[in-house]
Image (tube, grey):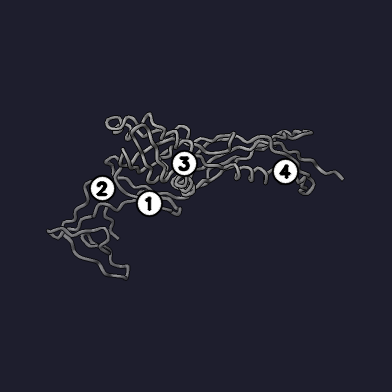
């Protein structure tokens, strides 16, 4: 078979295209200008056979490709593919670590606990306490027609359609915090959004001195104590059962519950906690 070598960016040009070589006996070699098929070839206007750009060997990997993409990255045409790759080289440690005999294991342990508070539940509580609320401040009056709370970044946004002296929609924002004493999620730092402040400062600056924000802060309190107490009780009961596993007996208790962080997702507020306690593992010796 004849071989046509192609060098980019100047493709090989054949003087005249002689057509497709349809011989299947394998005895007839391709002449310059013949093609076994038209894959990756084009015929020019003057009957020349030109190699199409675009087909080239980019990788010689005998592995299964899971996905690929081709396109421009910073104006450079790129081809990206992903595969399982090869197993990284590893070495086996010929010596074992020194054996250490101890008479006691550390008793303290931590358990990560998370609570998921759906925004639908938060909105239900907020509407029950705030929908229809009327605030009077001197000669001004604000009537809360509805309330919607949704997440945006690390904050909750409160959308408040109002009527009365001010007509329209007021927006407030704040990051939820955990009150360890009352076991509630609160919005103690709730305040008017920047956009609302920019508009209100020109036409309704009295809103900044009104009790509306304080009222919202006091009402937007979401209890999680029941869920936390239930989770703690379940863990504590398991530790108190003094259960045996083969030759070991396990007993323990919970000492402390600490908040870790609060994360806002598109559909819920997730509160993360750490349970700290003590556990004893005793070996049964017959």
Residue where numbered disc 1 is placed: 68
Look at the numbered disc 3 and give the secondary structure of its residue. strand
**Mark 3 → mark 2, Cα distance in angstroms:** 55 Å
Q: Earlier in the sequence, mark 2 or mark 1?
A: 2
- Near-viewer residue (235 or 76): 235
Q: Earlier in the sequence, mark 3 or mark 2?
A: 2
Q: Quadrant of residue 254?
A: top right
Instruction: Locate residue 260 relative to residue 193 in the image: left or right.
Output: right
Q: Earlier in the sequence, mark 4 or mark 2?
A: 2
**Mark 2 → mark 1, Cα distance in angstroms:** 25 Å
- Near-viewer residue (110 or 245): 110
Where is residue 192? Give x, y as percent. Answer: 37, 34
User: Is residue 275 depicted above or below 127 in this figure?
Assistant: above
Which quadrant holds the C terminus? Answer: top right
Where is residue 250? Give x, y as percent. Answer: 76, 43
State if disc 4 and disc 1 touch (CB < 8 Å): no
Q: Which mark is residue 7?
A: 2
């Amino acid at each position: 078979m004849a071989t046509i070598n192609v060098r980019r960016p100047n493709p090989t040009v054949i003087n005249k295209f002689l057509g497709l070589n349809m011989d299947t006996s394998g005895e007839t070699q391709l002449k310059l200008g013949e093609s076994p098929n038209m894959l990756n070839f084009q015929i020019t206007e003057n009957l020349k056979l030109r190699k199409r750009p675009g087909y080239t060997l980019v990788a010689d990997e005998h592995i299964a490709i899971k996905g690929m993409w081709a396109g421009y990255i910073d104006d450079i045409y790129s081809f990206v593919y992903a595969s399982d790759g090869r197993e990284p080289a590893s070495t086996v440690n010929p010596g074992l670590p020194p054996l250490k005999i101890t008479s006691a294991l550390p008793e303290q342990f931590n358990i990560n606990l998370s609570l998921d508070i759906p925004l639908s539940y938060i909105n239900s509580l907020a509407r029950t306490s705030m929908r229809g609320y009327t605030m009077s401040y001197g000669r001004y009056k604000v009537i809360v027609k509805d309330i919607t709370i949704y997440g945006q970044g690390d904050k909750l946004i409160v959308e408040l359609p109002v009527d009365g002296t001010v007509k329209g929609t007021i927006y407030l924002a704040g990051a939820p915090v955990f009150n360890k004493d009352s076991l509630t999620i609160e919005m103690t730092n709730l305040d008017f959004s920047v956009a609302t402040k920019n508009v209100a400062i020109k036409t309704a600056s009295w809103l900044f001195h009104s009790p509306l924000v304080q009222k919202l802060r006091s009402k937007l309190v979401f209890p999680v104590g029941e869920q936390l107490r239930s989770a703690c009780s379940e863990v504590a009961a398991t530790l108190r059962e003094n259960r045996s596993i083969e030759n070991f007996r396990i007993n323990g208790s919970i000492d402390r519950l600490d908040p870790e962080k609060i994360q806002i997702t598109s559909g819920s507020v997730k509160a993360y906690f750490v349970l700290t306690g003590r556990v004893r593992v005793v070996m049964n010796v017959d």
